[in-house]
Amino acid sequence: MMDEDGYLTINIKDRKPALNAVNSAPSSSWRVMALALLILCMGMAIGLVTLGILSVTQQNLQKAENGNLSETLNQLAKYFCQDLIKQSEQKGIHNHQCSPCDTNWRYYGNSCYGFFKHNLTWDESKQYCSEMKAKLVKIASQEILKYIKGRTGLIRWVGLSRQNSDGVWMWEDGSVFSKNMITLSGDARENMNCAYFYNGKIVPSSCESKQYLMCERKAGVAKVAELLQQEN
């Protein structure tokens, strides 16, 4: 091309290499590899979480099985020990070595029972039991009623009271007294807001009168070692 002065002008344009075609294939491959790596990582994470859940579940199942086995063994030890105690009492022996209860306390069901010949008011009796980490007896079943009736023929305070003459009879633990389970005998007049046990019945009485008492507290586990010695 000629310019105004007659010189030949040559236009030289920079030509950029066609990189798009060359780089498109590596870029596409990189994306596929990244996606595959991401999927692999997610799979590994899910696998680890699943293994963790299975491991925890297995541990919980193992603990539950061990707990159930331990509870079963404790129950068997309890029944065996209480049977031995019954046999010993028939021979005049009242404290078997397998009993988890202290001396002068009687082992029955899941509790230790103490029968004390102290003439105390109801509140004094409640305090006396509390000082020994126990409560006045609660008669919550026919089995316990039968046991207590066979154990003592004396008047003894139980953990039953009411706030006033119009109040509801309640045990120390806050549960309501059931007349379907045991008879509430006598005339519950005003100021007769505490109760004692006598001859298989619950009898209302003045809380200030003085009677013998009986306490109960939760028993520990029967002493298996003594049971094994008994067998040997």
Image (cartoon, rainbow, N blue to C red):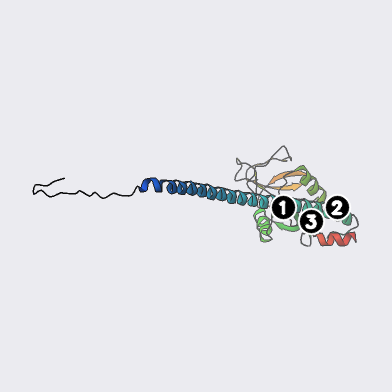
Q: Quadrant of the N terminus?
A: top left
Between 58 and 162, the one lying in front of the other is: 58
Q: Residue furthest top?
A: 180
Q: Which residue is mark 1?
A: 67
Assign the C terminus to one quadrant of the image: bottom right
Counting residues from the start of the chain, the first of labels 2 and 1 encountered is 1
At label 2, which amino acid type do we have? Asp
Nearest to viewer (mark 2 / mark 1): 1
Report the amino acid beneath label 3: Arg
Q: Which residue is mark 3?
A: 106
The residue positioned 80% from the left and 48% from the top of the image is 147
Query: Mark 2, mark 3: which one is toward the viewer?
Result: 2
Badge 3 or badge 1: first in the primary sequence = 1
From the image, tell me which residue sits under label 2: 83
Tag on residue 169? none
Name the spot of residue 132 as percent of width and height, x first.
Answer: 69, 61
| Alpha-carbon span between mark 3 and mark 1 | 27 Å
| 98 to 13, vertically: above or below | below
The mark that comes first in sequence, 2 or 3, is 2
Q: Quick one: label 2, few (<14), some, or many (20+) residues within 10 Å?
A: few
Outermost left residue: 5
Gap between marks 2 and 1, in whole Å?
24 Å
Q: Residue at x 57, y 50 (%)?
A: 44
Q: Position of residue 13 (x, y in %)?
A: 24, 49
Q: Secondary structure at mark 3?
A: strand
Q: Nearer the viewer, residue 112 or 115?
A: 112
**Element under label 2?**
helix
Q: Residues within 10 Å of mark 3 (few under 14, many from 20)?
A: many
